[in-house]
Amino acid sequence: MKPISLIQFLIEERRAGHINAELSLLIEVVARACKRIGVATGKGALGGVLGNAGTDNVQGEAQKKLDVISNEILLEANAWGGQLAACASEEMEDPQPIPDMYPKGNHLLLFDPLDGSSNIDVNISVGTIFSILRCPDGVTEPKAEHFLQPGTAQLAAGYVVYGPSTLLVLTFGHGSHEFTLDREVGSFVLTRRDIRIPEETAEFAINMSNQRHWEAPMQRYVGELLAGRDGPRGKDFNMRWVASMVADVHRILTRGGVFFYPLDAKLRAKGQSGKLRLMYEANPMAFIVEQAGGAASTGRERILDLQPTALHQRVPVFLGSKKEIELATHYHVEADAAV
Ligand SMILES: O=P(O)(O)OC[C@H]1O[C@](O)(COP(=O)(O)O)[C@@H](O)[C@@H]1O
Ligand SMILES: [Mg+2]
Ligand SMILES: [Mg+2]
């Protein structure tokens, strides 16, 4: 069968009425920017891109040089295309409107320009995560409040993994699809249409070093997985933790599994409501995972139903194979009801 390029796929999606011309062009621009980030990432020490930038982002986290470079690549690529009203990023406190000298469009773009940045210097997969919303009617100068739409309002979401191969996973709400970058040709090619996450799994991903800080229902759920064949689950579970959400989620989209970044006492002590950011990490990943037949919750509620209250809001994230996410969520809801 003839390979289908991202551009051909976008044409198909337009014909099917899933997206309009503006959104199709926006995806192309984002994909092109991600190719540039992939090139910068791939150069490693040769490109002088490793190490800290010497600055902190809005969340007080040390920025890596590649966090800053990736943010600039995405901003620059999207400034003049005419599809956007504004961009918001993990690396910027406030949204950046499209400058007046450029044509404006009807979309809002949010991104985590480089996810898993602690892994850059050790040559482990990193990625970019993005979410696209409609700019509310009549808003010409979008502010943070205009981005505060629930995940169910996303028009599109995607991520790119810069790993042994560069992969783009995309959804418009009609399934999740994977494209692999043909590095010689320079184009993304459809490699999996309508990805399905198996409902059941025997693999989980969590940062076990936080175990002592977790809430009781999380301790219970993971404790039962660790008990394996001799415990209540009656089977052995395997564990993986890349510490790049894109890579952990991509594994789940490939062979099933579950991913947890729960709220714990350590995060609470820092005044945080979770580790991962709702608008440009949890929401786009939840959209992709649900479109692949999986589930995504905070342990209490469906992520996509949350009404955001701040651009850089953090939330607990449970996502992956449906039956496991339902069980872990059930343990939390049940424990809450018992108090
Ligand atoms: O280092 P920890 O606590 O295991 O956290 C790892 C998590 O943090 C993240 O790196 C956060 O993303 P950023 O690198 O974009 O800040 C996730 O990709 C990953 O799942
Ligand atoms: Mg991230
Ligand atoms: Mg990041």
Image (spheres, rainbow, N blue to C red):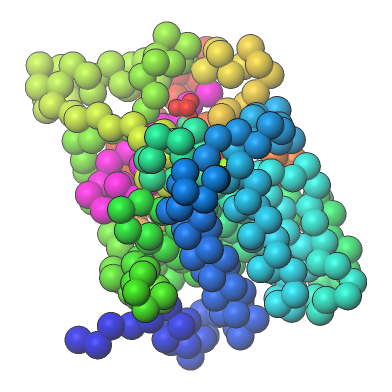
**The N terminus - image quarter:** bottom left
Q: Which residues are magenta?
A: 248-263
Please provide percent x and percent y for residue 91. 69, 43
**Looking at the picture, does residue 209 appear above or below residue 84?**
above
**Looking at the picture, does residue 22 appear above or below residue 37?**
below
Q: Residue at x 33, y 16 (%)?
A: 220
Magenta stretch: includes residue 257: yes
Please provide percent x and percent y for residue 77. 66, 68
Q: Residue at x 88, y 75 (%)?
A: 101
On the question of residue 323 being in view, the answer is no
The one nearer the camera, 93 or 44, is: 44
* 8 relative position to 268: left or right: left
Quadrant hosting ligand 3:
top right
* 265 relative position to 249: left or right: right
The one nearer the camera, 272 or 153, is: 272
Residue 72 occupies quadrant: bottom right
Q: Residue at x 54, y 75 (%)?
A: 28
Please provide percent x and percent y for residue 278. 60, 42
On the question of residue 121 being in view, the answer is yes
Magenta stretch: includes residue 296: no
